[in-house]
Image: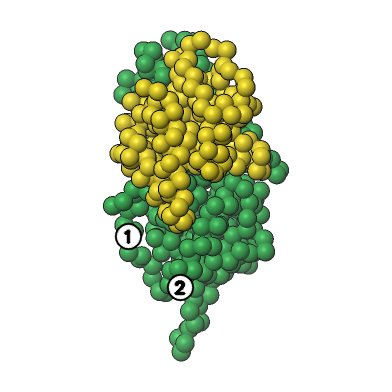
Amino acid sequence: MMLKTIFSGFGGQGVLMMGYSLAHGAMSHGYHVTYLPAYGAEVRGGTANCTVAVADEEITSPVSSEPDNLVVMNSPSLTTFQNKVTHGGIIFLNSSIIDARPSRQDIKVYAVPCGDMAQEVGNIRVANIIMMGAFIKKTGVVPADIYLKSLETIMGSKKKSAAEVNRKAFAAGYDFVKD
Amino acid sequence: MNKVLMSGNNIIAEAAIRAGCRFYAGYPITPQNELTEYMAEHMRNVEGGVFVQSESEIAAIHMIIGASATGARVMTSSSSPGISLKQEGISSMAACELPGVIVNIMRGGPGLGNIRPAQGDYFQATRGGGHGDYRTIVYGPATCQELADLTMNAFDLADLYRTPVMILADGMMGQMMEPVVFKKPKPRQYSEKFMLRGAGQGKSKFFRGLILDAIDMEEHNWKLERKYQVIIKKETLHEEYKTEDAELVIVAYGTAARIAKGAIKRLRENGMKVGLFRPITLWPFPELKLRALSKKVKNYLVFELSTGQMLDDVRLALQGYAAIDFHGRPGGVVPTPAELANVIARHYETID
C-alpha cells in the first residue's frame, strides 16, 4: 500500500495542519510516512500546500508524481493540482468557496461545504477538520479513532474546548459523505 | 524507543543536543531557520547549554571556534550564502584542528539565489571550501532518520579526527517530516589535553593556524593530509539499491537520491533494470566502492540538483571503466519521480 495526498489552499486555512495531522495519525498506526510542506516566501492569504505519503513499505520519494488523493480548500488549488491526480483518484473540494468542478470523468469528486458547516459548528477555523472527517471516511488511510487521538496529541497544549469542537467538526464531515 | 514526527531542521538540532552539543551560534537564513529556532528554545533547558544568535554568520563560526577550543561540543548552521561567509572560520578550524559541526541546508544559487532545494554547494563542501590545503568530512543524508544518526556521528568524527564536519542537506530535507528514532549517543571521547581551560601552574597551551616557518607549515600540511588519508580509508559510507542485476546505475545523493529511488521503483515495474548508488559521505567520496561496482555495471547516469558537480567525483572514481551520462536540475527545481523516470527510460533505451 502506498497512498499519496496533496493538501492545498490559502495560508491560514489550516492546510499544513491537515497534512501534519494525517501524517501523525498514520505514524501512530504503524505506517511509514513522509510529510513535505511546500515552503516559500509566502504569507497569510498566500498559497500553502503539502504532500503526505503513507505506505506499509519504505517510502522512496516524498515528492508525488501522481497523487492518489487531492484535497483543495480554494479555487486556485483546484486549477493547479487537478490534472496531477492519478487515474481513479479522489478530489475533495471545499464547495463553500469553490464553484468550479473538475472536468475530468476518471476521478471521484466529493464536494464538502466545509466552510458553511464550520459556521454551523460555531467556528470557521475548523473547516479543515470537517474536511478531514470526510477525507478519513472515504479514504480510510487511518481509522477515525487513531486520527482523532493524533489530533488531540498535536493540539495538546491548546485549551480543552478546542478538542471538543474538533471532535464535533470531524464527526460533521465524517457523516456528511455518505457510505 | 519512541518514534517522533519532526522536521529535518528540528531533527538535526535535537540530535545535536542529545549528542552533547552545548554551544550553538547561528544567524537566521531560510530554509534552515527552524534549526536555529529549535536551538533557541531547547538549548537553555540543558545544563551548560549556550545559544547565541550572533550578529553575523562570520561571528557565529568564530564563536564556535572559541567554544571548541575550550572543549565544548559545538555547532553552527546556515544556508548557502551564509556558509560562504563561514569559510574563513572553517579553514581556521581545519588548520587549528578544532572539532565542530557545520550544517548547510542548501538553497538555489549562486549569489543570494532562492530558497528552493538545490545541490550547488557540493564543490564548496567537498573541496574544503575555504582557502588552504584542507578537507572537511561531509555527510549527505537522504532521510530524516539519517539526519538524526549522521548528526550524532558527525560529532564523534569531529572529535576523533579533530576536524570540522559538515552536514550537507537542502531545503527539502530541512522542511520535510518523517518519523525518527533517536539512537543513544556514544559517550564522548575527547582528551582534555586538547582543551584550553587555563594552564594553571603548567606549560601554556595554544592553538594556531599561523605558522610562519615554511618547513613547519609544510610539515603541518602533511600532518593534516595523513589524517585525511586515514579518514578516506575508514569513513566512507554509501548505499546501493537494486544494483545486483542492474544494467544502468543512477548515482545521486540526498534529495536527488530520494527522487531517483522513486523513479527506479517505477522503471523496475516496467522491467527496466535500473539501480542506485548513493554516496552517504560526499567527502570522502566512496570512490573504491563505485569502481568495484563498475566491474559489473557499465552504464551510469549521475543525477544532481546542480549543473554537474559530484559528476567530477564519479568520473575520477570510474576512470573510464564505464560510460557516464548526466542529468541536472539546478536552481531549485525538484522534478517528480515520474519526470525523472522518463529521462532515465530514454537513456536506458540507448544503452547496449
Q: Position of residue B245 (x, y in %)?
A: 32, 20
Q: Residues within 10 Å of mark 1 (few under 14, many from 20)?
A: few
Q: Which residue is mark 1?
A: B186
Amino acid found under the numbered disc labelled 1: Lys
Which residue is more in the foreground, A18 or B234?
A18
Residue at point 43%, 68% (across, down): B46
Name above or below for residue A150 compared with residue A140. Answer: below
Amino acid found under the numbered disc labelled 2: Gly
What color was chain A assigned in the picture?
A: yellow
Secondary structure found at label 1? loop
Give the residue at the far right of this rendering: B111
Q: Which residue is mark 2?
A: B48
Disc 2 versus disc 1: nearer the observer: 2
The reply to whether residue B137 is visible in this rendering is no
Q: Distance from label 2 to label 1 (Cα)? A: 19 Å
The reply to whether residue A99 is visible in this rendering is yes
Which residue is more in the foreground, B186 or B228?
B186
Residue at point 43%, 38% (across, down): A170
Which residue is more in the foreground, A153 or A166?
A166
Chain under callout 1: B
* Residue A101 placement, left or right of B48: right
Which residue is more in the foreground, B55 or B326?
B55
What color was chain B assigned in the picture?
A: green
Residue at point 35%, 65% (across, down): B189
Give the residue at the far bottom of this rendering: B201
Residue at point 39%, 60% (across, down): B18
